[in-house]
Image (spheres, grey):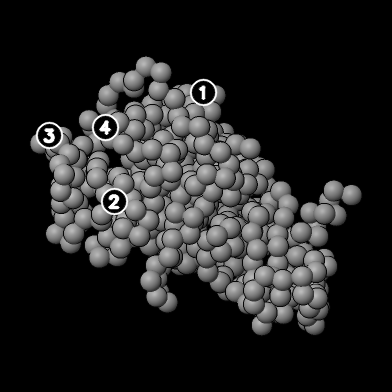
Amino acid sequence: MRTLNELLTRAAAARPTAEAVRHRGRSTDYAALDRAATALAATLRERGVRPGDRVGLWFGKSTETLVTLHAVLKCGAAYVPVDPATPVGRAAYILGDCAVRCLVTDAPRLALLHEHGLPDALHTAVLVGDEPAPADEPARADRTALRTTHWTRAVDRPVPEGFAPADVGPDDLAYILYTSGSTGTPKGVMLSHRNATAFVDWTVAEFGLTAEDRLSSHAPVHFDLSVFDVFAAASAGACLVLVPEHQRALGPALNRLVAEEGITVWYSVPGALIRMLDAKNHALLGTSRLRTVLFAGEPFALKHLRRLRAALPEASLHNLYGPTETNVCTHHRVTEADLAPGTEYQTGERFAREEHGPQPRRPQQGAPAAPGSTPSPSATGPGDGSLATTGAQLTPYAVGAAALGAAGAAILVAVRRRRADARH
């Protein structure tokens, strides 16, 4: 099975001069992106980053973000993205909780972290931005000092002869995403290469991604939607168009970006799409190259979904669903029947009720759920209403009915049934 750290190298070998990343009018081809990621990986390795270590990212999304993600994976380490807007106390907690050994950040954020107190395991930092470090600082015995290197020194350097990416396996850790902490302390979700590549490979096949596509990158990298943007683009050899952070909530700017950059595949929360539809220039969507629109993370009211269909009559619309632990475990392609007048269900609820009826049928404890069955929403724990998912498009994971809800569980079982039927 492939691992994430192979994707960029393969794309660079196959299409070295193809556009890999586009950000604020600046393009980077696959050869340059891979060269920068390999140089940064060599720097990180020289600074003590080893397979299995955690490397934090705490700065605004940019081409440097993509370089960092791929560099960390080339080291065999796991990347830990932190919300650029998060308070320093929360950032320090996350970096300390997962024992980050290296941090890629900018000078202002590093200064805040120094004032707050450095996490115990942190020993080196790479600084992005226009403010160069005066010199590399030597490591010292006390933990209040970091060995810092500026981005240009870390990337604009020759790669040591014989350097090769770390040998990692499918079950090795690839990245850690932290929950919002809205109900308590933020918790880290550890995702393996197997988990991520199962999702990426499915999306490339399911949505027919090719090297001719141009994918949007709307979600921040600490949000699991970004896994599709970053790695499905690399897997297909497509171009990833980064949405500038100050434009993420501006509908008019997003519409112009879609039109001017020739984006063919869009993925975001429904709220962003609604802002785009509300903008005065929403007609740009109808003249754009968009062929596929994916949405997840929030409910999408039918009245707005109908507006999206009217704006993009030829594009395919897909509702993806899944907790952070699986990224996505199922999806539903929006049909005309879903949007018919008089329909009041949300997509998932309608699918579950029409396919399987309103009455839940609970399997006996420990028994496999029959296709089409709906575990009780009050059930908790393995073997009691839990749903074990398998199949090419599903990330192996057990989802409890209490957390998922009856309708969502029914969708998962139905997708499993449909995949099984397709093999016969």
Numbered label attached to residue 13: 1
Where on the picture, by quarter, is residue 346? bottom right
Q: Tell me the crowding category of disc 3: few under 14, some 14 to 19, or many 20 or more residues within 10 angstroms, Cα based.
A: few
Circle nearer the N terminus (2, 4): 2
Q: Tell me the crowding category of disc 4: few under 14, some 14 to 19, or many 20 or more residues within 10 angstroms, Cα based.
A: many
The answer to whether residue 298 is above or below residue 223 is below
Numbered label attached to residue 121: 2
* Amino acid type at mark 4: Ala
Q: Is residue 350 left or right of residue 290?
A: right
The answer to whether residue 328 is above or below residue 356 is above
Mark-to-mark CA distance, 1 and 4: 23 Å
Q: Nearer the viewer, mark 2 or mark 1?
A: 2
Residue 285 in sight in this render: no
Residue at the spot of label 3: 135
Mark-to-mark CA distance, 2 and 4: 21 Å
Mark-to-mark CA distance, 3 and 2: 22 Å
What percent of the width, then of the height, locates residue 107?
18, 48
- The residue lying at 56 percent from left, 72 percent from top is 299
